[in-house]
């Protein structure tokens, strides 16, 4: 880069850099410091330095570990369902259907609704809608209020999250699919490759960059989920759908233990960073150049 | 060519700097905004600073908005009412105070909650309006008056007079019989609802309040010296809960709205609620209702106490504190204000200068109990912080969802949850 270019580069990056520093980096560093103190959140009350005590406390916190289990289970299920559905949608709407534009719009629409509102809408569906359906169809084994069943509430959460995210990943997959040259597919067709072969041997390898992005988005999104979690189940029933973020929030505001909650948040950050980085490295390796 | 390029670069830089400056200017404006509509007088009367008010009761949210408008009409001063948040109130209040963006006036519950926020209170001992507070009803910390009570409140079994006779609900046996006969008639005998306080917070208060010294009992419980499972009143409470579980609609399926809706339309005979719930029933003209005690262990008194009060944030600017005092003074001494407290908020006044006439039936029951001393206190206000929402409610939800759990097991789980939360 020439020196002059560097100057312009620096100048135009500066505002973003300043914003990023003030709203992300600095609070993060302060947050690390907070994780070593014990404090109840009232400004005039003392903040006591306790060293690593907060981190030790976490390891005796069963509820934190069960929330970790729920988060893992939720993330795995969501990862699979969101990407399968997103991919299926994208293949469907790039197939030259006459209604593909309309279908695209409909699939993407849920993403425009905020997570909180989405949660409340689905709460109604699960509570009243399912009950009604169960009564009408006689399938009360399937259609009952999922939100008050400790086992099914988590699946309900997966359904809502999928509904929200599938359309978004679909858009990314569409972009990837449209980036694949038609000649390649046509040549394969001429050579006698069937639909399945073309899909697995050409489309998927060339879609790898899209996979990287989509998996990253769903992975980090599912790990950090809070809004849908709050409005749909609020962690209930009996803490059975309490995810990481909600557990941290409850620690801080429910019990007023700022230090412990902050320590959890740091731990949470490390876990999310570790998992998503691993995923990105693995899928990046599988990307092929044309 | 080169010159235009340079000019363009210069222009871009100017825009950038300008936008940065604008951004900076805007943020500083925002932070000062809350109070800077300064008290510079425009017309004859003294103009107060604009203040904000935050409170926990969803029931009076609308009435409070209306009152704010009237206040503006009458005095020209502005008060901004922040949306009330119900169960999430504490969380939001704490976050706002910690961020130094707290409201000028906010409400706190009496007991542990009042203690918790004590570093934020303005000492209102010398203000005019506190002189009218009924004896022992003010919120006090370290001998100073820091809050005016919103009013007296009470709860118990709210019942539909055409469906239930209080004589049939006096002890466990008669309560069980009534529940069973209701169920046979296709009526939901007693409805709780899924919200933390309506599910367990209020109903659990009764066995606590029946102890000789509720506060001492809670302290012993915190230290692990006593167990709910070993205490007579709680054992009977558990039996009541067993009956409710067996013979009523699962409370986990019921929200506050459906609870009151079903009660108003006669599908439910009794609800465990307080006088605040009348607001949701006021539109049903044919409904004849009353409030009776929850007859746990022979209890024949309503749970009545001051739920909390208004306090002024001492972190607010001096002109805001002045405005807040002016507002409270107006609320508790002007005709409009007093009228709003009784007629709009449906509060039972805890002030000597406000007459309580034309109360709704539920408030009337509470008011009469207060006058005759037939009341038990709100021991739940002395529970450890957050315990109802975070620990006791999940245990209770488990009890109602898990068909195999006995009342005995439920008590043990409550004890375990308490021990964990109080450490």
Image (cartoon, coloured by chain):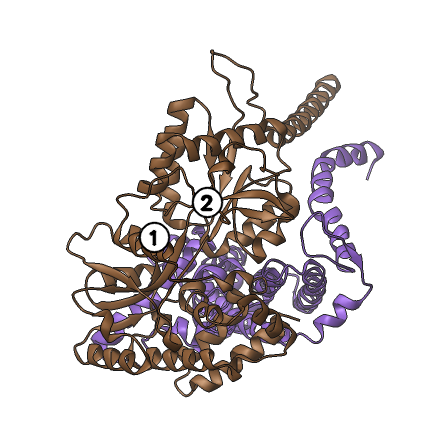
Q: Is residue B263 visible?
A: yes
| Above or below B175: residue A278 | above
| Discs 2, 1: same chain | yes
Q: Give whichever of A21, B253 is nearer the camera.
A: B253
- From the top left corner, tell me how far across and down residue B320 is, in percent: 57, 30
Q: Earlier in the sequence, mark 2 or mark 1?
A: 2
Q: Give whichever of A35, B322 is nearer the camera.
A: B322
Secondary structure under the numbered disc 1 in the rendered image: helix
User: Residue B367: which numbered mark, if any?
Assistant: 1
- From the top left corner, tell me how far across and down residue B229 is, in percent: 51, 83
> What is the CA distance from the residue labelled 2 to the residue labelled 1?
14 Å
Chain letter belonging to callout 2: B
**The chain drawn purple is chain what?**
A
Q: Residue furthest right?
A: A3
Quarter of the figure with the C terminus of chain A: bottom right
- From the top left corner, tell me how far across and down residue A213 is, in percent: 60, 60
Disc 2 target residue: B134
Q: Residue furthest front?
A: B372
Residue B161, image quadrant: bottom left
Q: Residue at position x 56%, y 66% from top?
A: B215
Quarter of the figure with the N terminus of chain A: top right
**The chain drawn brown is chain what?**
B
A234 left or right, relative to B356: right
């Amino acid at each position: 880069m020439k020196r002059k270019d560097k100057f312009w580069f620096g100048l135009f990056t500066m505002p973003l850099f300043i914003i990023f520093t003030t709203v992300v980096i600095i609070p993060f560093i302060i947050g690390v410091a907070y994780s070593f103190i014990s404090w109840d959140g009232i400004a005039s009350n003392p903040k006591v330095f306790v060293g690593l005590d907060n981190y030790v406390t976490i390891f005796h916190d069963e509820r934190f570990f069960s929330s970790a289990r729920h988060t893992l289970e939720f993330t795995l299920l969501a990862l699979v369902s969101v990407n399968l559905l997103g991919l299926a949608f994208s293949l469907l709407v790039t197939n030259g259907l006459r209604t593909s534009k309309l279908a695209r719009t409909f699939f993407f629409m849920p993403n425009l609704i905020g997570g909180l509102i989405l949660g409340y809408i689905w709460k109604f569906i699960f509570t009243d809608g399912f009950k009604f359906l169960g009564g009408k169809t006689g399938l009360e084994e399937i259609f009952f209020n999922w939100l008050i069943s400790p086992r099914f509430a988590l699946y309900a959460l997966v359904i809502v999250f999928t509904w929200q995210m599938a359309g978004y990943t679909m858009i990314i997959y569409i972009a990837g699919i449209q980036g694949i040259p038609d000649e390649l597919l046509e040549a394969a067709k001429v050579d006698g490759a069937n639909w399945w072969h073309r899909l697995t041997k050409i489309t998927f390898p060339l879609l790898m960059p899209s996979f990287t992005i989509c998996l990253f988005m769903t992975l980090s999104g599912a790990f950090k989920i809070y809004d849908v979690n709050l409005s749909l189940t609020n962690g209930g029933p009996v803490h059975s759908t309490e995810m990481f973020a909600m557990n941290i929030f409850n620690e801080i505001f429910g019990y007023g233990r700022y230090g412990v909650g902050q320590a959890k948040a740091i731990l949470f950050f490390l876990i999310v960073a570790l998992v998503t980085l691993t995923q990105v490295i693995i899928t990046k390796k599988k990307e092929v150049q044309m | 060519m080169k010159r235009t390029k340079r000019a363009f670069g210069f222009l871009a830089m100017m825009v950038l700097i300008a936008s940065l400056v604008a951004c900076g200017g805007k943020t500083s404006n925002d932070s000062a905004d809350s109070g800077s509509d300064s008290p510079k007088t425009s017309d004859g009367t003294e103009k107060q600073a604009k203040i904000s008010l935050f409170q926990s009761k969803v029931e009076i949210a609308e009435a409070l908005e209306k009152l704010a408008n009237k206040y503006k009409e009458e005095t020209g001063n502005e008060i901004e009412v922040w949306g009330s948040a119900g169960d999430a109130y504490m969380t939001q209040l704490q976050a706002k105070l910690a961020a130094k963006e707290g409201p000028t006036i906010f409400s706190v519950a009496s007991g542990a909650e009042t203690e918790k926020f004590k570093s934020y209170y303005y000492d209102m001992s010398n203000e005019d309006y506190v002189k009218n507070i009924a004896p022992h009803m003010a919120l006090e910390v370290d001998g100073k008056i820091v809050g005016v009570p919103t009013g007296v409140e009470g709860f118990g079994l709210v019942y539909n007079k055409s469906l239930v006779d209080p004589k049939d609900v006096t002890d466990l046996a008669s309560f069980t019989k009534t529940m069973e006969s209701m169920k046979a008639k296709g009526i939901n005998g007693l409805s709780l609802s899924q919200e933390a306080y309506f599910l367990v917070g209020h109903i659990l208060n009764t066995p606590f309040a029946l102890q000789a010294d509720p506060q001492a009992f809670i302290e012993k419980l915190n230290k692990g010296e006593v167990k709910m499972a070993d205490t007579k009143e709680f054992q009977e409470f558990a039996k009541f809960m067993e009956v409710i579980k067996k013979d009523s609609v699962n409370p986990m399926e019921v929200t506050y709205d459906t609870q009151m809706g079903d009660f108003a339309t006669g599908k439910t005979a009794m609800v465990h609620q307080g006088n605040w719930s009348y607001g949701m029933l006021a539109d049903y003209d044919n409904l004849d209702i009353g409030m009776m005690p929850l007859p746990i262990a022979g209890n024949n008194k309503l749970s009545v106490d001051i739920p909390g009060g208004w306090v002024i944030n001492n972190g607010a600017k001096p002109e805001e504190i002045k405005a807040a005092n002016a507002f409270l003074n107006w609320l508790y001494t002007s005709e409009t204000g007093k009228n709003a407290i009784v007629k709009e908020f449906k509060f039972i006044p805890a002030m000597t200068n406000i007459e309580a006439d034309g109360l709704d039936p539920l408030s009337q029951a509470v008011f009469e109990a207060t006058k005759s001393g037939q009341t038990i206190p709100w021991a739940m206000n002395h529970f450890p912080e957050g315990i109802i929402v975070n620990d006791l409610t999940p245990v209770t939800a488990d009890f109602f969802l898990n068909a195999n759990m006995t009342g005995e097991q439920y008590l043990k789980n409550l004890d375990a949850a308490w021990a964990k939360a109080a450490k």
